Image (cartoon, rainbow, N blue to C red):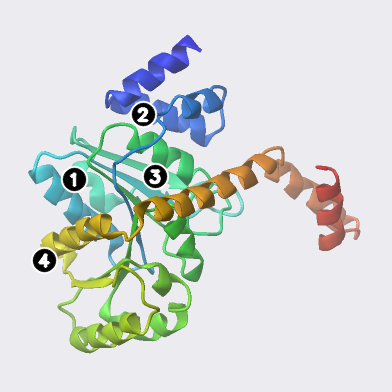
Amino acid sequence: MTDVKDLVSRLLSGDFRALSRAITVVENDLEGTDEILSALPAGSDVPLVGITGPPGAGKSTLINAIIHAYVSEGKKIAVIAVDPTSPFNFGSILGDRLRMSDHFNNENVFIRSLATRGSLGGLSAKAIEVSDLVRAAGFDLVIVETVGVGQSEVEIAGLADTTVLVLVPESGDEVQVIKSGVMEIADVFAVNKADRPGANIFISNLHHLVHARAETGWKPVIVRTVASRGEGIAELISAIKEHEKSADNPVKRKAVLLAQRAWKLMQEKSMKHIDREKMVREIEERLSSGDFHLFRFVQEKSAGTE
């Protein structure tokens, strides 16, 4: 318990090594996890921005430009990059984003990759816990970048204070497909690579889609960016900050977000005893003997948890 208190104390003081160690403990559910999480401050005013969008939209390049803008002002920024997980070995497929490598040794920048580990919503199963650990470490901004898998990424809205959806001019047909999901959760749209042909038409169509959404206290902002050249980054940061200040009822919004996080954590607790690798072996044995029925298997395992 003394070690945990010391670890949390160093984490709260902004010690990157302590933060990294705490994340490792929590992500792998090692001894001390509950004590570390319980010792965190009750709330944090550090804004958490979720950045999501389809593969190839330039999310990592955009984040790299945001990092540069914050660092140039002497501010501290953290990035939690959620990577896809192999369904066969449960390891991260991508690893740390190479485009952010310029900032890895900067004392004001903390970058950590998390594997989704079977979570289907674009986030890591431990994203809630890890994001709260990072927010407690005294940063000016925390960014969570999701894997970019499509409509299931609506889960980011339950974690982030502000959600940025990154699209490119070629996303036209894709927007029609995903607008019933991801489109509804975006607070800010970043049309990246806006120097490409068709950008004006795409942005005009996007404006029509945004204005067709149900009226809320915040009308989503569309920002043009060319992240590789740093264009539009100041406008994007400004739009994010405006959204942070805009909530009609911040207490109600926060209650909704926290309820979603609490629900997710309770789901994880109830599934904690399940060993996925052991389950794979058991299913493999049953398949070999010709005695596997998916729904009966689930019912059998569910009955065992009651």
Crowding at dot 3, Cα within 10 Å, few <14 / some 14-19 / many 20+, comes out as some
Q: Which residue is mark 1?
A: 102
- The amino acid type, in three-letter code, at marker 1 is Asp
Mark 4 or mark 3: whose residue is earlier in sequence: 3
Query: Which image quarter: residue 63?
Result: bottom left
Mark 2 or mark 3: whose residue is earlier in sequence: 2
The single residue placed furthest to the top in the displayed view is: 2
Label 1, secondary structure: give it: helix
Labelled pair 2, 4 in contact (Cβ < 8 Å) = no
Quote the CA–CA distance across marks 1 and 3. 16 Å
- The amino acid type, in three-letter code, at marker 4 is Glu
Crowding at dot 4, Cα within 10 Å, few <14 / some 14-19 / many 20+, comes out as some
- Residue found at x 71% / y 41%: 274
Quote the CA–CA distance across marks 2 and 3. 13 Å
Label 2, secondary structure: give it: helix
Q: Which mark lies nearer to you, 2 or 3?
A: 2
Q: Which residue is mark 3?
A: 113
Mark 1 or mark 3: whose residue is earlier in sequence: 1
Q: Which residue is mark 2?
A: 19
